[in-house]
Image: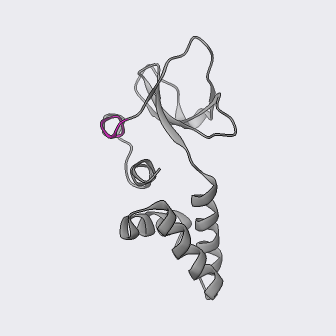
Amino acid sequence: MTTVSEIIRCTLQDLGSRKAAIRYCQRIARAGGSFAAQYAEAADYLSRTQASYYVLNEHTLGYVLPPQPNVFGVLSADIHGHNPMSGVVVVTLTDTLRVATLEDFQRFRVGGLWILLFRHG
């Protein structure tokens, strides 16, 4: 069974851009077939999620979505950071955010689909 995350990963890798991946998924979804629903969901996800990736207080890697700029989704953290299993974190004035780099994804051992979304942001 093909999952939505597999579809997103493969289309981003093969096509090289978010816009091309969205168009491709929409075309497959319109054509119908056994995976039409998964491709429609993948196109919807890619078109509505324009996350920005940050490092919070130098100990937590995560993302912020435009509709909620003070809510930080945790992807990974070091021993002093926030637990990804505990959900989102509210960013306050005392927190520091810096834009994440590819090296941060490697440092926090986050890979696969997240790196592709980061690159094609």
Residue 32 percent location from the top left of the image: 64, 87
Furthest residue toward right:
67
Q: Look at the image and say whether residue 10 sits in the magenta stretch.
A: no
Total marks shown come to 0
Residue 69 quadrant: top right
Q: Main secondary structure of the magenta part?
A: helix
Q: Position of residue 12 (x, y in %)?
A: 43, 64
108, 67: nearer the viewer: 67
Q: Is residue 105 above or below residue 6?
A: above
Instruction: List the single residue furthest toward the front.
Output: 19
Image coordinates of residue 85 in percent, x first then y, are 57, 37
Quarter assignment of residue 89 = top right
Q: Which residues are magenta?
A: 101-105
- Provide residue 57's location: percent of width, then percent of height: 46, 19
Colouring used for the render: one colour
Residue occupying the point 62% across, 88% down: 31
Query: Quick check: is 103 in the magenta stretch?
Result: yes
10 vs 78, nearest the viewer: 10
- In the image, what residue occupies the spot 31% across and 34% down? 107
Up-down relation of residue 21 to residue 67 (above or below): below
Residue positioned 42% across, 23% down in the render: 59
Note whether 55 is above or below 38 in the view shown.
Answer: above
